[in-house]
Image (spheres, rainbow, N blue to C red):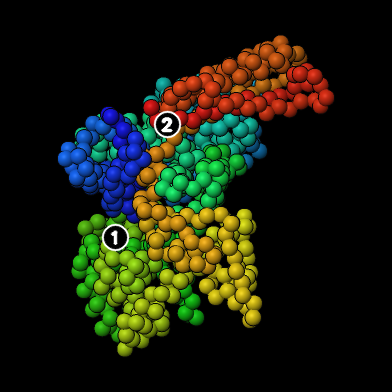
Amino acid sequence: MKEHFTIGIDTGGTYTDAVVVDTAKREILASAKSLTTHGNLSLGVINALKQALETADTVAKDKSGKSFDVSEIALVSLSTTLATNALVEGQGSSLVVFLLGFNDAMAERTEITKAIPDATIVRINGGHVYTGKEQQPLDLDTIRDALNSEIGKAEAFAVAGHYSVRNQSHEREAAELIKEITGAPVTASCDLSDSLNGPKRALTAGFNAQIVSLIVQLESAVREAMQTLGINAPIMIVKGDGSIARADSVMYTPIETILSGPAASVIGARYLTGQKDFLISDIGGTTTDVATVVDGWPALNEAGADVGGYRTLVKAIDMKTLGLGGDSEVEIDGLQNITLLANRALPLSMLAMRFPHIEEELACALTADSGMHSALQYLLLQSSADSSDFSEREQELLGLLSTEKPIPFREVIVSAKDRSTLKRLISRGVIRMSGFTPSDAAHVLGMQSQWNTKAAFYACELLGRATGYVSNNNTAEKIQAFAQKVHGAVVEKSTRLMIDQLAEKSFNDNDVLVNAVASGHPLIKDLQIKFESRLPLVAVGGPAGIFYPDVGDRLGKEVLVPEYSSVANAIGAAVGHVKSSCIIEVTLHEKHGYQVHARDEVIHAESATKALEIATKMSIAAVKQDLITKGGEVQNESDITVNIERVEIPDMEDDAGLISAKIIAECESHAS
């Protein structure tokens, strides 16, 4: 059978994962991991793909004596946190947002100036009213004048019109003119949401325009890797709601990929476990994400995905996220309390694996009388960057660092101003700083072994001595006891997160009962405390098998950590489905009859029944076309579900009391 293999790829902050799935046999043929190469994403993708294909070839030869044939790959599907990370870190293209028909209050409620401080906002006469009728004529001349000034040199543009979801014509005209004059990508807010909330639509459009170029670069990196390895197949991307779509259909709406990685992990967990109703925790290097899955699909956050504290109108899975992972930096305060910082540190065991001299330097630091804590801190340049993007001091600091060799922190950072500069560069992802992490502790405890275990031991002893946890004559057992405390801190924090999700409540840090269970000491005097999850518990992600068996013990239920859990995101990308939905609104005309608010026009109908009939046909046709555009296929029209949300006068017969309605057509299919 030709074309029954799919490739799943997940680009995370630390690793790029790749899997080969035989969809006909529901079998995972191969998986691989490669360090993410932030300076050139294609290198990490090529490395992971190459390893996965080599494994698939070995498996195929063992089974049939024949080599794995890349021509049988039907599609390549990608999940990524690139969009989310870029927006949170303030990265992306220079941006201009045109607001059509917005007054002062509406422009302020967009919060664009706070969320995207470098964006330029231009207000233009135009827009529509609630019924879809023109509010003011669109002032195209002012748009032309603006684009012929310095504003026209921006890298990306967004357009948001007042009530554009009731009449899209002004947004369409403005977007076409901007494309014609500048040739730059333009985001129209009506392409992203059907919400009447104009300010939120404008902010969502601005965020989207800011990151178009990043997704284009990622798609280009994956395509380059595929060409290098002789793969000729469509590229799909996982969206924030867990569905997949052709990359070219998402290319200019990349904000739809917010929470793509966590969404893919949910789909992967469902595939790996066969569970339909469960609580999932996805722990990676930087964050832990938890979600509840009902009837095989994660619930969506109807309020819209949150980006850096700003609410957007993008549909994404309803998920709690905590800055907790294998790469969380361990900090010890003066009272010897262990804190797991939200920032991601470069594990010293990983750093020493890549740069063997680090092991020796850590060993030498143990013989020094002071500076033990600073001996754990190295700076490594993540990627080269355009120096024009940085201040003079930032450029000076970057000039001292290298991608080829980590530099000791104390040799570069000598003042408070230096620390502030370094913090900004780390937040932008340009520099990574090493530190002792839960992954290092796991190496000390023998729970991990893929990196440099000796370096982990030295780093654990250095931090222990620097904070008074261990002394100069401590045995290996004492050092391991310290590592066990770090491990326990991760388990406790993970348990609290799952308790919050199970109860759908954020418990206070001082809650005695929750603290007793989460700490692993569920006894208050003579009272034994026991919590038990009603739902099955599933954990995926690289560190899941290290921490979650203990989490299960504290919650009275075994946590399922399935085989291939460390690449669940990539598996979710490979086995995802294409989903499409279309909404057509019907409103009562101000004089007589009804209006059907179609994509490019407003259609008048004499009766409610006729308006609903027109809207239903249009929504079915639109959802079919959208599904095809996204890479799916409608086999039978019966596969399309149509729901009508009505607002009407009570006790009226048939459609006589209709005031307004939303006709919602939805369809789901495998990628075609």
Q: Is residue 570 visible?
A: yes
**Residue 504 position within the rendered picture, expressed as x and y whole percent measured from the top left:** 62, 55
Front residue of 334/21: it is: 21
Q: For this view, does 298 lie left or right of residue 60?
A: right
Residue type at mark 2 is His
**Quadrant holding the C terminus:** top left
Q: Is residue 156 visible?
A: no
Mark sitting earlier along the chain (1/2): 1
Number of marks: 2
Q: For this view, does 248 lie left or right of residue 323?
A: left
The single residue placed furthest to the front in the displayed view is: 64
| On screen, residue 38 above or below 404 | above
Front residue of 150/198: it is: 198
For image coordinates 32% across by 65% down, the residue present is 448
Q: Nearer the viewer, mark 1 or mark 2?
A: 2
| On screen, residue 327 above or below 528 | above
Q: Which residue is mark 1?
A: 380
The single residue placed furthest to the bottom in the displayed view is: 473
**Residue 377 position within the rendered picture, expressed as x and y whole percent measured from the top left:** 33, 69
Residue type at mark 1 is Leu
Badge number at residue 670? 2
Front residue of 332/229: it is: 229
**Rendering quarter of residue 482:** bottom left
Secondary structure category for the residue under label 1: strand
For image coordinates 24% across by 77% down, the residue present is 363
**Quadrant holding the N terminus:** top left
For image coordinates 29% across by 60% down, the residue present is 380
Label 1 environment density (alpha carbons within 10 Å; few <14, some 14–19, many ≥20): many
